[in-house]
Amino acid sequence: MSLVSRVPFYYGWVMVGTALAINAVSSVMNPVVFSFMIGPMAQELGVPTSELSWSFTLRLFAGGIIGPYMGVLLDRHGARWMGVVSGALVGTMLILLAFVHNIWLVYLVFAVSGLAGLGGPAGQLLTQVPLAKWFVVNRGRALSIATIGMAGGTMFAIPITEWLLTTTGWRGTSIIFGIVVAAVVIPVSGILVRRSPEDLGLHPDGAKEAPASAAQHALGRHAHLSTARNWTVREAMRTAAMWQLLSALILAGAVLTGTLVHRVDYFKSLGATSEAVAFGTALDPLTVVFSALAFGMIADRVPVRYLGAIGLFGLAASIVPMIVSEGQAMTVVLHNVIWGAAAGGYITLNNIVWPNYFGRGNLGAIRGIVLPASIASSGLGPPIFGYLLDSGIQPAHVWYVSLASFAIAGVAVLIARPPQWTGAADVEDPTPTSPSKSIDPTAVGAAR
């Protein structure tokens, strides 16, 4: 009896569970956790935090380089064995990080770990692209559940990281993280992950019949939310929506990572206690768990650009407590709670907008093409913010940049209407990687 036949429910929900688990352990690689390690690492290595910030940047850049290739491979072969390789590579690099004593070797280890993708935007391809192929009607719900793995993992990783740093130092912490990542990602990917429902004789969302009707899907109640057509990379890149979204995510990505990496040291520099900062920072992912789930559920009913704009405007609002803070614990809490609540909308935008606007057939390739630009901006954020803060500029002026950038990105997302197809009406084929079939143009509804 096969693994799939032993599952008493739609196997897509098993895929949601694998993505949630992988995201949870990968949280040790994200900027929030790194923000607690950057201080001890910089102190021991004898380098400014602005220079050490480049290690995070190099990891993102490496993910941007591998992203286009990873996206194509995901469309063709799925995430199963890619997940195994990624888990082994990240685990090995985290363990090796504990034995380096030179900033250049730190850069090398971080860059190589970025090729695995986990913990960064490229890693999201490993968990989000497969799920977008397994779900259409319940796409928002499925992706939001998987996404809370990263937030939930971060919530637990923050106090664990603080405790490990005080008991074993950052080197011991890195070894433990490497073992945990490898021990979870490798078996989960190798045993449970599958490419698409069609590979197992199933249909998206567990439907008894294919969305065969791509035409029926287009005319159904979700026609205003998700396109029924598989756009190619070239076609997608010619749309105004692609460039509006990409511009918004480039701008938001730079200030988001810059703020995340440096906000912990900033609050401490104002006199906030380590306990207050740790507690406040832990409220961020805790709030994200609920906001990402709520936004994801709503995304099955409301156009995603509205949710993305709300999230970005909320991130702008979260900067206000940072600007007015004088080290009070309440400002730390307010910033993180507002940030976490808004982040659910921003995360949902990143998860849902690409399959909803451009279909699931070439999703990996499309996300892989736009990934390098968003990664470049996200990677440059931490060192740029680090140099600005080290230069003696009033920190409040740096945070004003964050506030304005999030607001501008929110406007760009709000006006990014889904693309209208004006050519032959190709629609989604039941097999995501096969050529699209043509039907009567009047039977196809564009996403709104």
Image (cartoon, rainbow, N blue to C red):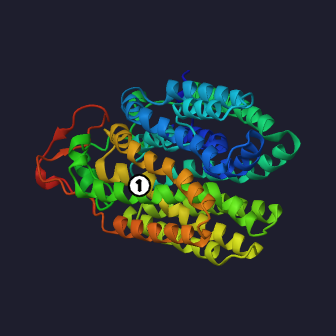
Number of numbered tags placed on the structure image: 1
Q: Which residue ends up furthest to the bottom in the rendered image?
A: 324
Q: Nearer the viewer, residue 336 or 375?
A: 375
Residue 107 is situated, as x and y percent measured from the top left of the image, at: 60, 34
Q: Nearer the viewer, residue 248 or 436?
A: 248
At mark 1, the secondary structure is helix
Q: Amino acid at mark 1?
A: Ile
Residue 92 is situated, as x and y percent measured from the top left of the image, at: 66, 25
Residue assigned mark 1: 250
Direction from residue 441 to residue 121 in the image, left or right: right
Query: Dividing the picture into quarters, in which one does residue 102 lie?
Result: top right
**Residue sitting at 68 percent across and 63 percent down?**
266
Decide: few, some or many residues near mark 1? Use Cα within 10 Å; few <14, some 14-19, many ≥20. many
Direction from residue 144 to residue 219 in the image, left or right: left
**Residue sitting at 88 percent across and 42 percent down?**
167
Residue 419 is situated, as x and y percent measured from the top left of the image, at: 23, 57
Residue 125 is situated, as x and y percent measured from the top left of the image, at: 46, 40
Quarter occupied by the N terminus: top right
Quarter occupied by the C terminus: bottom left
Q: Which residue ends up furthest to the right in the rendered image?
A: 167
**Residue sitting at 21 percent across and 37 percent down?**
436
- Vertical side of 399 occupied by 22: above or below: above
Q: Do we see residue 303 in this rendering?
A: no
**Residue sitting at 56 percent across and 52 percent down?**
382
Direction from residue 76 to residue 41 in the image, left or right: right
Q: Do we see residue 263 in this rendering?
A: yes
